[in-house]
Amino acid sequence: MKSKFKAMFMTACLLPVFYGSAALAAETGTALKNDTIRKEPYADAKSAGSFTRGESLEILSKQGAWLQVKTKKSTGWVRLLSVKRGASSAGSQSAGVLAAASGRAGTGQVVSTTGVRGLSEQELKAAKFNESEIKTMESYTLSADDGRNFADAGKLKPIAFANLKAAKGDTK
């Protein structure tokens, strides 16, 4: 009985050590497309190298919509949507691209955004429902007839797009 207790105690003590070392290990990823590695997390930053689709990457950190990655040849920053997190699988690469582009990731297919322009994280967290602002916003809504009258007053002409189809209930 004492030896079982001792073994359980040792396991409980060593468990955080194993999990802690796993947390320190860098995350792996796979390149979804050919892309340029930047020296800084900006689209206009100088190039630090490149990688090709399917190449394994080591993900070092994340900053906004950018990942700091390390390849065999270089280290730098790439857009979040250029990398599929986790080990590469034998499955379809296009499924990974579609999941990343839609913001759907992981087994739960949770949708997330990579950024909201103009609002800070604190402002988003502190956001509260404001009925009067909703009513104000809705007061700007116009009917289809009002829109047509506006277009007529500005001598605007309709343009038909062959690839766009009217939804059910819409008028032409």
Image (tube, helix red, strand yellow):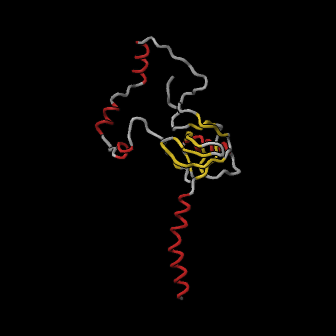
Give the farthest residue toward the left: 132
Give the farthest residue toward the right: 90
Q: Tell me what residue is drawn at x 36 percent, y 45 percent.
A: 122
Q: Nearer the viewer, residue 111 or 58?
A: 58
Which of the 4 image quadrants contains residue 21? bottom right
Could you tell me residue 97's position as x and y percent? 62, 42
Above or below residue 18? Residue 57 is above
Tell whether 151 sits left or right of 97.
Answer: left
All told, the count of numbered labels is: 0
Q: Tell me what residue is drawn at x 55 percent, y 44 percent.
A: 68
Above or below residue 54? Residue 158 is above
Above or below residue 40? Residue 30 is below
Tell whether 164 sits left or right of 91.
Answer: left
Which of the 4 image quadrants contains residue 3? bottom right
Could you tell me residue 169's position as x and y percent? 50, 30
Quadrant where the N terminus sits is bottom right
Give the farthest residue toward the bottom: 1
Could you tell me residue 58's position as x and y percent? 60, 49
Q: Tell me what residue is drawn at x 43 percent, y 18 percent.
A: 148
Q: Tell me what residue is drawn at x 69 percent, y 46 percent.
A: 92
Q: Nearer the viewer, residue 134 or 68?
A: 68
Could you tell me residue 8's position as x and y percent? 53, 79
